[in-house]
Amino acid sequence: MGLRNVAIIAHVDHGKTTLVDQLFRQSGTFRENQRVEERAMDSNDLEKERGITILAKCTSVDWNGTRINIVDTPGHADFGGEVERILSMVDGVILLVDAAEGPMPQTKFVTGKALALGLRPIVVVNKVDRADARADEVLDEVFELFMALDASDEQLDFPALFASGRGGYAGLSADVRSGDLTPLFQKIVEHVPAPDADPAGPFTMLATLLDRDNFLGRILTGRITSGKLSANMPIRALDPEGKVVEEGRASKVFAFRGLERVPVETAEAGDIVAIAGLSNATVANTIAEPSVTEALPAQPIDPPTLAMTFAVNDSPFAGREGSKVTSRMIRDRLLREAEGNVAIRVTESADKDSFEVAGRGELQLGVLIETMRREGFELGISRPRVLFRDGENGREEPYENVVIDVDDEHSGTVVEKMALRKGELTDMRPSGGGKTRLTFIAPSRGLIGYHGEFLSDTRGTGIMNRVFDSYGPHKGQIAGRQNGVLVSMEQGEAVAYALNALEDRGILFISPGEPLYQGMVIGENAKPQDLEVNPLKSKQLTNFRASGKDDAIRLTPPKRMTLEQAIAYIDDDELVEVTPKSIRIRKRYLDPHERKREARKAAA
């Protein structure tokens, strides 16, 4: 049976997952009448809601005697560390581009990595049936993108197909409107080389993905580079330097069949498999027969650049909404996450009540907090802070490469805001359709919390993509939030009369009747300092009848923050209280006297 390993690269929303669903249906992987969820590849809830692929996944289809292993790549740079390793498992890539939007900056990141590894792309222009499709222009843009990414002549001579994932057809010209995906299957078999693997050598494999199963423990996925693997065979794991990490047995070997991981007795060189049985081996380790002493070359794992503190929720409302509130539960959950996610590092604090979680960006950590919240956890989350390191010239901080696409009229505002955040403009060019593409190198520290502001500055039309660039010299002070906050002095339920009086002071985050506690942040002050207020004050009752009726109070709707907005909004002396039902902002120290004491200490 022939074998092909191919990765799919696509920007968020360009239709990758829908196309793969159709490949399954047409290869007979799914029975005709089998009910398959839409977007079968994005299996976790958050992926479905945000419409993004966070975890790389493997699937496989059989077509006319060839098994095609398809690896899905995450498009977001926060999960970019995954990408390079995934590409080392495949021999070809399919670049999927929307026929209206064209190639996007984020695909540029993954495509650049694929071209650098020498992979030859197949370009699929998807959604050709859109009313605003401009398939031929988009193909030219892809060619220009490859030129800009220093593609070789061989890579520039790429085959192109036009398709509609939703319609389930592909063809060689842009006016195709019917048929099936046979042309795509044929292209994969013709154009992607069979895996270059050595069936005769000793068994070796590079672990590329790490996953955790409640019954089997760690599961490592990778492509077999040489030899043959059978269940229960003795194996060892080597780190990139060739030191032995651990020795054990391959208690279970899985191959991919459709969306399932199916246990198999043996697997051949070139196939992508998953192994259970090792407890310490991780991504970038070489899994091999005990006789092997040399590790396979592996991509280093990008360093975490951002950290947040996850603490036990100690607010007066702790335990009202969540079922998992103890530090032991939080610790177990975080360690389990770090075991399956190589980009996350967890360290316990001295008091055992909080944990520092380091990762690669706000999106990645935001996804983790949101997942935990849905599982019933309550947490206190600190403001994200950047991880510095000591370099040759003193303190260094992480910089990111930021690519922004905006309508021309907003470009001035964006350049100005990025300058305030110490971002340097490295490139500015028109990207067609009245849009400008701006490229910056900016310290990660300056970008914390910018995304929300960026969306309101560009009226929701801007697209910003960020990827870790390098560590560089510390850029000095970056201005933070300009306004102070309104802090509740009392505990109880908010009263409309009191809130009406507070509206002049700033923007409120709460509505009447909401439960509050002392030290909770209920709004933003219009002035730079914090203000303590009493949102529970009701109207003094007198014998005189007032001409204005109480029911005439009309409050402006409060500003509600999403989890990511709240995390980006808070200052160093504040926390976000996250529970399954609520997101509240509070002062780290709830008692006003203690707050003043700590503020004095910090100033000194």
Image: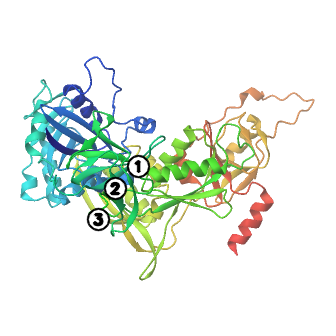
Within 10 Å of disc 3 (Cα), the crowding (few <14, some 14-19, many 20+) is: many
**Which residue is tagged 1?**
277
Q: Amino acid at mark 2?
A: Ile
| Cα separation between marks 3 and 1 | 19 Å
Quarter that holds the N terminus: top left
**Which residue is tagged 3?**
295
Q: Is residue 249 left or right of residue 544?
A: left
Instruction: Tally the numbered discs.
Output: 3
Residue 55 location, x and y as percent? 37, 45
Compared to 289, does 250 lie above or below?
above
Residue pictured at 53% horizontal, 46% vertical: 369
Q: Amino acid at mark 1?
A: Gly
Q: Earlier in the sequence, mark 2 or mark 3?
A: 2
Within 10 Å of disc 1 (Cα), the crowding (few <14, some 14-19, many 20+) is: many
Q: Splitting the image into 4 quarters, where does residue 81 fall?
A: bottom left
Q: Is residue 44 left or right of residue 493?
A: left
